[in-house]
Image (spheres, rainbow, N blue to C red):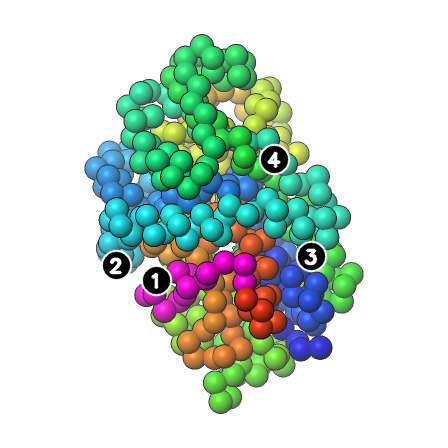
Amino acid sequence: MPHIAVTGAGVVGLACAAHLQMRDFDVTLVDPLPPGEFCSFGNAGCFSRASCVPLGLPGLWKQVPRWLLDPKGPLSIPWRYGWRIAPWLRRFQRASSRGRVERIADALHALLTVTLDKWRVLAQWAGVPDLVVQRGYAFAYESRAAFDADALGRALRRARGVELEVIEGAAIRAFDPVLSPTLTHLVLLPEQGHCPNPLRLSRALATRLREGGARFVAARATGFDIVDGRVTRVLIEDGAIDVDAVVLAAGAHSKALAARLGNDVPLETERGYHLSIAAPGVAPTIPIASGEGKFFVTPMETGLRIAGTVELAGLDAPPAWARADALLDKARRLLPGLRADGVERWMGHRPSLPDSMPVIGRSTRCANAWFAFGHGHVGLTAAAPTGEIVADLISGRPPFMDIQPFSAKRF
Ligand SMILES: Cc1cc2nc3c(=O)[nH]c(=O)nc-3n(C[C@H](O)[C@H](O)[C@H](O)COP(=O)(O)OP(=O)(O)OC[C@H]3O[C@@H](n4cnc5c(N)ncnc54)[C@H](O)[C@@H]3O)c2cc1C
């Protein structure tokens, strides 16, 4: 059977490997870390089939100065990194026009709306169907102004058939008594899902892959041997792996490897943080997102996870833990009974392209090299559909959707 190397064993690489193994390919995963322990470890766990709304929206720039001036705000750009991120921000702004936003929303919607069906297949295959929960989630707002500021996002979702229910005033506490009486609006999205333990999900995929004969090589991919437009070997720190094809799924570290495969992609990292609270004293029935704070509070097997915020500070800067700590006070504005017993902090690197869309498809230089990276805020959601698409492409079958919008050549 053809031998495929998947570089990167985050949730995206694991989903690609799983679908390749289901199609009887011989699979090797290459990653210096154990499966699922980089960005895929600490996300908010939401299967956001409604996340067709890109980050860059027409009116967003009006809010940016206020966010940047607030050290605990939802967006941070350390001044030292500002000049390096400037070209990415320019592309981000160009992708924020109304016309681009509609096209991006169409493409993201096609990829994400199928997530729960695609994840059920993978979770069943890995023996963990309990990790795909569909009870919905909600956006909570502390003022009408904040609710109104998200009107375009709601319109983009509604136009694509996403079910939304707006609950106001006292009815919010009737919906879930743990929520603060000061909330003015709750937007319920009943079709969404969540994973109560993203690390267990990655580990279950890895276990099933091993049982099926996949090899895990604990090494960093450093490059590729390319002969006549085809990758023949993946180079690792102290050796090389012979391959028939390669999938690049190294998350936020994919840029340099993609360049070796012929594509210069403006991949950056949006760092995010979480607080995991083992004994929170409150138990919301579904994940709750803060409309103002841009973070989620998700009920997990390990306690309550408060996850989110965006920090544009690159791959190497040390964590700014004050940003994680700030999440606690903000979460208490949604859940007044929240206690902080047994808190763990985490920082992760979202792999982000400026138009909020991933890169999925063939490399320009090598006919047998395939890209699956850059999923930004929706990598858990998009992993299962992406894995199926990549395995279909490598098998020579048409994928379930048009993947042209995700081509690396768009940059
Ligand atoms: C705070 C926060 C909340 C989030 N919430 C959600 C959410 O609710 N829902 C959602 O869908 N998404 C969410 N995300 C986004 C999601 O977590 C990411 O998009 C996703 O984990 C990316 O997966 P990945 O496999 O591409 O990358 P990663 O998980 O980062 O995996 C990439 C792997 O590549 C490896 N690697 C790096 N360099 C090399 C190399 N040279 N050779 C070999 N391997 C290499 C790394 O070690 C790593 O294991 C959130 C992210 C954050 C930070």
Tell me the residue that label 4 is attached to: 134
Q: Specify the quadrant of the image occupied by residue 66.
A: top left
The residue segment tinted magenta is: 399-411
Q: Is residue 1 magenta?
A: no
- As drawn, the label of residue 266 is 1
Sequence-first disc among 3 and 1: 3
Sequence-first disc among 2 and 4: 2
Kind of residue at badge 1: Pro
Tell me the residue that label 3 is attached to: 206
Is there CB contact under 8 Å for labels 2 and 4? no
Q: Is the residue at mark 3 in contact range of ligand 1, meaning its CB lies under 8 Å from it?
A: no
Kind of residue at badge 3: Ala
Q: Gap between marks 2 and 4, in whole Å?
A: 39 Å
Q: Residue at x 32, y 65 (%)?
A: 411
Kind of residue at badge 4: Gln
Secondary structure of residue under mark 4: loop
